[in-house]
Amino acid sequence: MILWELIFFNSQALLFLFFALVIKLKLKIWQLVSCVFAFTALGAILGETSTGLFGLDVLAGLLWGSWDRSWFPFCSWIFFPVAGYIFGIILMHCKDKTKMYKRILIMSALLLIPFIILSWNYKIKFGFEDFYQEQYYHQDLGI
């Protein structure tokens, strides 16, 4: 259990360091999105590449998910906090928040239908039936 806590909290620490760097460098949204694409591509390329040494695999697991017990690797999960950050910026500058939320609801509902159909047809796993839910924790460009 201690190993899980160490890995989980260190992945959160990487996230805080990333956003500290974003704020320090005053990155614009397009630069932030470019970083996300680069990290996500790097995570997809490295996949579950192992270093062959347990200690290094634990550290590499923080970045790209090098073993099956590395949860929330930075390269796979950076998309979600950055999406929330960009959403927050848009929300702060939006004049009619009710209208914006209604649009988001309609777009989300319309996108959910093809998403469910495609994931069912192509048998995309999301980790619901697995004990360690590796597909969930180790997402790649297929998200």
Image (spheres, rainbow, N blue to C red):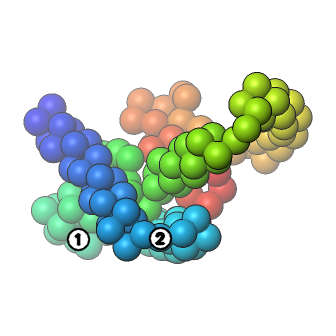
Q: Position of residue 2 (x, y in %)?
A: 11, 36
Query: Which sits earlier in the primary sequence, circle 2 or circle 1?
Result: 2
Say what amino acid the circle numbered 2 marks: Leu
Front residue of 37/128: it is 37
**Lateral position of residue 117 relative to residue 27, left or right:** right
Displayed quadrant of residue 106 = top right
Front residue of 103/34: it is 103
**Lateral position of residue 109 relative to residue 41, left or right:** right
Q: Position of residue 114 (x, y in %)?
A: 87, 40
Say what amino acid the circle numbered 1 marks: Gly
Q: Badge 2: few (under 14), some or many (20 or more) residues near its Cα, within 10 Å?
A: some
- Residue 52: assigned label: 1
Displayed quadrant of residue 60 = bottom left
Q: Position of residue 6 (x, y in %)?
A: 15, 44
* Residue 18 visible here: no
Q: Look at 39% across and 35% down and name the residue there.
A: 132
**Lateral position of residue 46 relative to residue 99, left or right:** left
Q: Secondary structure at mark 2?
A: loop
* Residue 17 visible here: yes
- Residue 27: assigned label: 2
Q: Secondary structure at mark 1?
A: loop
Front residue of 38/143: it is 38
Front residue of 75/83: it is 83
Vertical relation: 30 (above or below) 92: below
Between disc 2 and disc 1, the foreground one is 2
